[in-house]
Every structure is written in structure tokens, then in C-alpha cells.
Amino acid sequence: MPNLFDPIQIGDIAAPNRVLMAPLTRGRATRTHVPTALMIDYYRQRASAGLIISEATGISQEGLGWPYAPGLWSQEQVEAWKPVTAAVHAAGGRIVAQLWHMGRQVHSSVIGTQPVSSSATATAGQAHTYDGKQDFETARPLELSEIPRLLDDYATATRNARDAGFDGVQIHAANGYLIDQFLRDNANFRTDRYGGSIENRIRLLREVTERVIAVAGAGRTSVRLSPNGDSQGVDDSNPQPLFTAAAAMLSDLGIGFLELREPGPDGTFGKTDVSRLSPDIRKVFTGTLVLNSDYDDREKAQAALDSGVADAIAFGRTFLANPDLPERLRMGAPLNRDNPRTWYSQGPEGYVDYPALESADA
């Protein structure tokens, strides 16, 4: 079996190791969602990852409700991303852009209009906004006539990612956001061709993926799913047939890789008693399969590779706090602990000041 430090071909991307950087929302862009110079250092520091999956990046103002998160719908945003991707490449790294539409997780105070979703539903709890936390609002269902416009937004963001220098894109179809709201039956009550049967509920994911592939190519397109258990209030009564159908469809389309976020019963950032579906998905998805969630040390990650289910592991908070994570894992060196207080703050603290091994030893 391969080890974490063996190279791997991930679609059209040749990765030097199997230690991937998971997408991590960090809130260091401007209020108009333009990347900042601080982000150049952050991503450059982590270029030793086999592949960096960028923080979730909005495809449109409609879909981006997280304060100070970056976007990819304007030329200004494209130009600001260019030095980020150039810095990663200059340091020998590879980076793909995760494309994000939050659906009902958006608040009107951030986007200036009512949020949209598969159906007229609301998330329990409160949204992060520029004015502090506010109660989530009931979304309006996307009209059939609006679906082509949504697909155009994904295509535009993909072209912009390519123009900004990204090596590919990942479609965010997980974590209770818009595509996940179409996939799962406790959020999708539609009676048209996007609701009801599994075939209908995976239709939007298929159409988005096809549009993205048409721009980026299949080998530079990937998808993230969260198949087991509740995610921000989005869940399914029978996830196994739903997500194996989705994975089989994505396999047929030939995407470069599929990433699964799968918390367990003892998860440290979300937990569930719903069994992990990655073994079933492995049977139907023939491309590179990447697993994520609580792989916080070398032993757990290597065990997932040894099982034959995973081809690579995406590390999240561990990579946040350890910019040289592959080398630390290789050497068995101690790991820095992340500071949750600075996850979403706007400054350099807890962002670009985590020490690498050389500075830690100095």
C-alpha cells in the first residue's frame, strides 16, 4: 500500500505527496470579497502540501454570506488571486479553488437580498454577519428559470479560477450548502425535476459538474461531499443510496478527485453516529478518493490509506496550525495546536505566524 509521502496523480495534477490541505474558511479577504496580500503568505507557507484546496470561494454575491471570505466573480478578485497562486507555484506547490454557493446559509444583511435554496426552508441557529450573529432567514426556492443562471455563475467562476492561475477547481457540494440542500431530503421538497427521486436530487450536482468540466476539463475538476449525518441542519433519511448514486455519477464524468468530509461519533468539529459511507463510495468511484475529518496524526491517516479506501488525506485544522505539515508528519515532529479564537479574525495572528520547524527550533 502507498504511504502518505508517496507521489500520486490526482486527475491531471501530479502531486508529490498524499498530504492534502483541506479547504479552510479564514476570513482574511476584504469586505467586498477581494483577496488580500496577507493571503499570499498564508498559502505560500503551506505549498508543501501535495495539493492545496483553497478556502471556500464565492461564485457570486448571491451565494457568499460569510464575512470577509473571498470571491471569484469579478475581475478585481481574479487579479488579487493571481499573486496568491503565483506564490504557491513559485514555492513548488499546487492549488485548486473551492467554488462555493452557501444557499440558505446566507443572510440578507450580507448579500442584500433574500437567500435562495432548493425549497423554502431555514437553518436553525444564527448566521455570521458583519453586524454580529443574526437569526437565519427562510430561503426562497430557486425557480426553474434561474437554474441556467446558476450554472452560468459556476462556469464564470471556473473561468476566473483558471485565469487567476489555479490548477483546477473543487465544487463545494457538502456541509449543508446549496448543492447539499438539493441533495438531501430534509431540505429538498421540490416536486419538479430537481426534487423527489434520487435521480432528480443529484441532477443539480450533475449539471454543475458538467458545466465546470466544460471549462476546466474533467481532470482538473473535483467535488466535496459530506455523506454521513447532519451538516448545518441538512440531512437525509437514507444517505447510502443517495451518495453512492452521486459518487457513481461523478465517477462516470471522470472527475479528478472526490473528497469526503466524514465526521465520526467522537468528532472534534461535528460528530455523528451515522456510519461513514466511504467504503461503499469506494466501490463505485474509480478516481482518486480523498478523506477528511479528524485525521490529526500520521497513524490515523496512514491507516486510512492502508485500508484501501483512501488514496490521500485532506488535513484541515492541523494544516492551519502547521504550515510545514508534511515534513512534521514525515519526521514525527511535534505539532502546533491551532487557536480557534483566531480562525476567522482579520489579522496575521493565528494566520501567518504559526512557526515552521526551523523557527520553532531557533
Image (cartoon, rainbow, N blue to C red):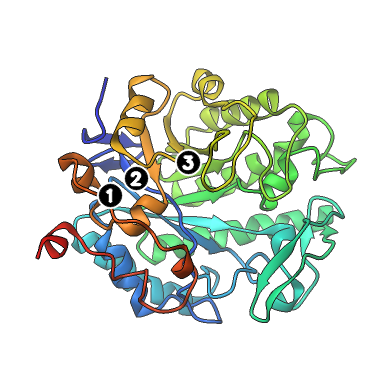
Q: Looking at numbered disc 2 in the image, what kind of residue is underneath it? A: Leu
Q: Which quarter shows the C terminus?
A: bottom left
Marks 1 and 2 in Cβ contact (< 8 Å): yes
- Residue in the foreground of this view, choosing between 232 and 271: 271
Image coordinates for residue 170, horizontal then vertical, percent: 49, 49
In this rendered view, identify the residue nearer to me: 54 or 255.
Answer: 54
Q: Are marks 2 and 3 in contact (CB under 8 Å)?
A: no
- The quarter in which the N terminus is drawn is top left
**Residue at the spot of label 1:** 49
The Cα–Cα distance between marks 1 and 3, rounded to whole angstroms, is: 17 Å
In front: label 2 or label 3: 3
The reply, left or right, for residue 347 in relation to residue 109 is left
Q: Alpha-carbon neighbours of circle 1 within 10 Å: few (<14), some, or many (≥20)?
A: many
Rendered view: 194 above or below 307: below
Q: Amino acid at mark 1?
A: Ala
Image location (x, y in percent) of residue 173: 60, 46
Q: In this view, which residue lies farthest toward the right?
A: 191
Name the amino acid, label 3: Ser
Graded by Cα atoms within 10 Å as few (under 14), some (14 to 19) or many (20 or more), the crowding at tag 2 reads many
The residue that disc 3 covers is 293
